[in-house]
């Protein structure tokens, strides 16, 4: 306790030099810790602006990640198709859906069966009816994203042994179908399956990010209820043919770390698909090129910021060195008094080490917060003392900025070895 009393009494006696020294240390820490803060903030703003521009030019949602697989048609692999899809679904849930580093807006998956031939169910044996080639498909929550032009939405269960489905208007016209018509398949692998057209649908919003493929492209598909589709494939009534996955994240809320992670997830999905099944389509990231070049810009910006801040850091270091030298020189008589009273060199050294450590700790705690404050001001300015009406930079304190602050404090602690 006596040592602390001596320490604070000594600091109070030389308070102006101590305040000057602390100010220099805080400025050095602020400049150093602001480097990662400003870099992450400006990179985030640049990324979001580029993604916004990409969205406006291409009408593709930049935060979309999609994948597609075409399942093998070999008979010996038929029994594994559902199991393979379950593995993929589980992987998406673990790596994308349950990931807290980015905000998930939509998760959509789509399934299709093999193409089958169908003919009208009520056909005379002497007639030669027109046959149509279709596939059975399902898409997550599709009823919320389409308008019903005619009829009703399909039932979740078979009605009198018949599967109900809905189609687009183009498919209805091209195949000369009508709502209420019932068809039967005549394929060897799906013989006798009855399908009834109960509804005609159209896309509700043409610009909705739910649609990775426009509904107008579904000219060969009969859309059924998800529960009914699962029954069809699990009982192997009609074999699975392909599957799609689509995840949309809130790209406007991406940070530097989460953007890197999002790109890594895309690469991990590619690796998982490649190791699990052949005939997969590489995972698609809408703004893949922007995310890839973003890493290059990050390294270039970091180098630029260091080159701009090095002169300021050198000046701050010289300032701290000179003030600490003045402080030690002014305290030489006190050191002599302490020595005359029996204090050893080690005790005097520890006393001054405690003083410098206390100042360094204060600078270490306050520096990053000052750096974040200065970064916000820089983000609102257009030039010197010229502020513009735009959104502030998104500023966040990370372990990196405190790490930089700790390194700077280690180099800026005042001399304690004199005397």
Image (spheres, grey):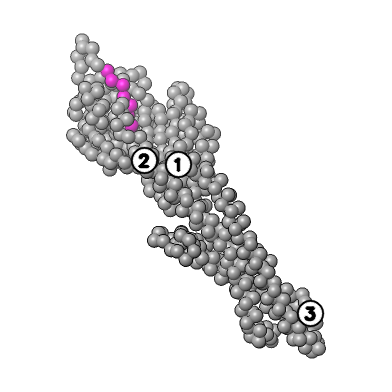
Q: Mark 1 and mark 3: span between their CA atoms? A: 63 Å
Quadrant showing the N terminus: bottom right
Q: Magenta region: which residues?
A: 131-137
Across the whole image, how many numbered discs are drawn on residues? 3
Crowd tier of the residue under label 2, counting other residues whose Cα lies within 10 Å: few below 14, some 14–19, many 20 or above: few
Q: Which mark is residue 287?
A: 1
Disc marking residue 219 = none
Q: Which residue is mark 2?
A: 59
For image coordinates 73% across by 79% down, the residue present is 328
Q: Determine which quarter of the picture holds residue 212.
A: top left
In front here: 181 or 318?
Answer: 318
Element at badge 2? loop
Dot 1 falls on a residue whose secondary structure is: loop
Q: Earlier in the sequence, mark 1 or mark 3?
A: 1
**In the image: residue 182, left or right of residue 137:** left
The magenta stretch spans residue 135: yes
Please determine whether, in this image, residue 126 is positioned above or below residue 254.
above
Residue closest to the eye, 231 or 170: 170
Can residue 26 be seen at all in this image of the molecule?
A: yes
Residue under pointer 3: 419
Distance from the alpha carbon under mark 3 to that under mark 2: 71 Å
Query: Whole-percent x and y of residue 324?
Result: 69, 75
Above or below, 26 against 125 in this view is: below
Q: Earlier in the sequence, mark 3 or mark 2?
A: 2
Which secondary structure lies at badge 3?
loop
Q: Is residue 392 left or right of residue 345?
A: left
Taking depth in this image into account, of 324 and 191 the one nearest to the observer is 324
The secondary structure that dominates the magenta segment is strand
Which residue extends farthest top? 126
Sequence-first disc among 2 and 1: 2
């Amino acid at each position: 306790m006596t040592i602390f009393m001596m320490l604070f009494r000594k600091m109070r006696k030389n308070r102006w030099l101590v305040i000057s020294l602390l100010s220099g240390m805080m400025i050095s820490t602020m400049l150093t810790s602001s480097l990662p803060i400003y870099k992450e903030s400006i990179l985030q703003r640049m990324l979001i602006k580029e993604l916004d521009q990409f969205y406006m030019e291409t009408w593709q949602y930049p935060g979309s990640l999609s994948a597609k697989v075409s399942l093998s048609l070999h008979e010996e692999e038929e029994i594994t198709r559902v199991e393979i899809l379950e593995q993929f679904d589980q992987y998406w849930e673990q790596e994308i859906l349950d990931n807290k580093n980015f905000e998930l807006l939509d998760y959509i998956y789509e399934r299709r069966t093999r193409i089958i031939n169908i003919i009208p169910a009520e056909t005379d044996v002497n007639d030669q009816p027109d046959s149509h080639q279709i596939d059975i498909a399902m898409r997550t929550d599709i009823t919320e994203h389409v308008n019903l032009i005619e009829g009703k939405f399909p039932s979740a269960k078979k009605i009198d042994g018949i599967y109900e489905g809905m189609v687009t208007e183009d498919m209805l016209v091209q195949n000369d179908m009508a709502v209420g018509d019932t068809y039967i398949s005549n394929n060897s692998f799906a013989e006798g399956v009855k399908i009834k057209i109960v509804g005609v649908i159209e896309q509700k919003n043409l610009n909705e990010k739910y649609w990775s493929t426009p509904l107008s492209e579904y000219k060969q598909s009969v859309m059924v209820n998800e529960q009914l589709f699962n029954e069809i494939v699990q009982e192997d009534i009609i074999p699975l043919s392909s599957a799609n996955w689509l995840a949309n994240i809130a790209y406007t809320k991406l940070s530097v770390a989460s953007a890197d992670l999002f790109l890594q997830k895309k690469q991990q999905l590619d690796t998982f698909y490649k190791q699990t099944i052949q005939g997969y389509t590489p995972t698609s990231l809408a703004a893949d090129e922007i995310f890839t070049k973003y890493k290059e810009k990050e390294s270039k910006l970091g180098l630029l910021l260091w080159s701009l801040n090095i002169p300021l850091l050198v000046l701050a270091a010289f300032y701290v060195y000179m003030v600490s030298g003045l402080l030690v020189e002014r305290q030489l008589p006190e050191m002599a008094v302490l020595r005359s009273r029996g204090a050893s060199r080690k005790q005097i050294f520890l006393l001054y080490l405690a003083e410098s450590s206390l100042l360094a700790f204060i600078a270490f705690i306050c520096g990053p917060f000052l750096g974040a404050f200065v970064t916000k001001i820089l983000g609102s300015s257009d030039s010197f003392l010229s502020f513009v009406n735009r959104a502030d930079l998104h500023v966040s304190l990370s372990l990196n900025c405190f790490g930089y602050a700790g390194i700077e404090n280690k180099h800026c602690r005042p001399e304690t070895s004199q005397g």
